[in-house]
Image: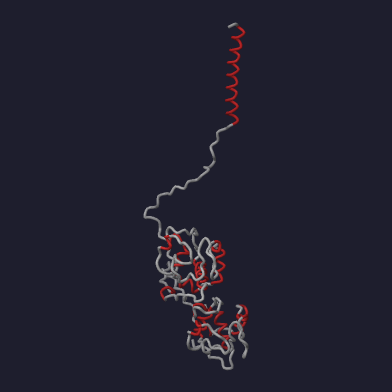
Amino acid sequence: MDSMEVNKTVAAVLIAGIVFFLSGFIGVNLVNERVPEEVAFKIDVPTAAPAGGAPAPAALPPVAVLLAKADPARGEAGVKKEGCVACHTFNEGGKNGIGPNLYGIVGEPIGQGKDFTFSAALSGKKGNWTYNDLNEWLAKPSAFAPGTKMTFVGVKDNQLRADIIDYLHTLSHNPEPLPTPTAAELNPPAAAPAPAAGGPQGAAAAPPPSVETLLASADPAAGEAATKKQGCVACHTFNQGGRNGIGPNLYGIVGAPIAEVEGFTFSNALKEHHGKWTYADLDKWLTKPAAFAPGTRMTFVGVADPKQRADIIDYLRTLSPNPQPLPAK
């Protein structure tokens, strides 16, 4: 091998070394290793429960008490707001969707019928859908029936849940009677109030005044205005000899027999009430017709304000040649 060949070989080795060195230098500066600021996928690792275990979930309020103040119109809006209509139909004979049709669900067997395949978790339940069951189910389906296919997390708002149940209750030719709250449910034992600083314990809240008490200061003019504000005039007439409309004429209604107005056909639900319209009966009826006469055709949800109810009743009392005397307090 002559000197020329040796020089070529040495040169080739040197060039290769230089290229290797430069490639590494360029690669290090072009591709910088960088630690991510946060992990791409977070994996939740359950932490140990605190000593003593997790607190027990709060008990649901009595459904009878909630239903006494429920509004089926709000409930119908609630099923749309909560997205129930995405999986269910509510009309009579409606098709099943991801979930079953819910017409007539109150009082029907749990997890059966409807030509729908229910999960074993729900079909394993016994009995019919009661108001208590629906309250627990809608609060948290996975707690009522562990393993259910229902992915809905539940309705946390107690009153909205009752509104939805009340709406479901109306989806029937013969609605199930609404439950009547017990005295214990209406007046649960109150926790002892904390003593005020430097003073005695606070007094318990007074019960709401009776209709008899409210009538003593009622205003019939305000009551007449309320019948317009509440929309009563859309279904009823109030003048003597007035024609029946969707509802009966109401002239002389105070003290008149219940469900007896000439020329008007009342529902069987109202006919089952006997006697005459007393102030107490009118107050109950106006509070919530569906609770006073379950199955009534009266779709009006009721007047929530006790004072306004008393004003309306006092106005109705004046619609007579001989108004009924006001009750003694």
Up the image or down, 315 lies above or below 168; here it is below
* Depth order, front residue of 288/127: 127
**Residue 110: x and y, percent?**
44, 66
**Residue 322: x and y, percent?**
57, 93
Q: Residue furthest top?
A: 2
Residue 196 horizontal side relative to residue 92, left or right = left
Up the image or down, 243 lies above or below 68; here it is below
Residue 11 horizontal side relative to residue 44, left or right = right
**Residue 84: x and y, percent?**
54, 63
Say which residue appears at 49% left-offset and 72% top-offset: 67
- The mark tally for this picture is 0
Quadrant in the picture for residue 187: bottom left
Q: How is the image coloured?
A: secondary structure
**Residue 274: x and y, percent?**
47, 87
Q: Residue furthest bottom?
A: 322
Look at the image and tell me whether residue 65 can be seen. yes
* Depth order, front residue of 239/306: 239
Q: Residue furthest front?
A: 115
Up the image or down, 257 lies above or below 297; here it is below
* Depth order, front residue of 180/311: 180
If the image is split into quadrants, where does the N terminus sit? top right
Look at the image and tell me whether residue 197 can be seen. no
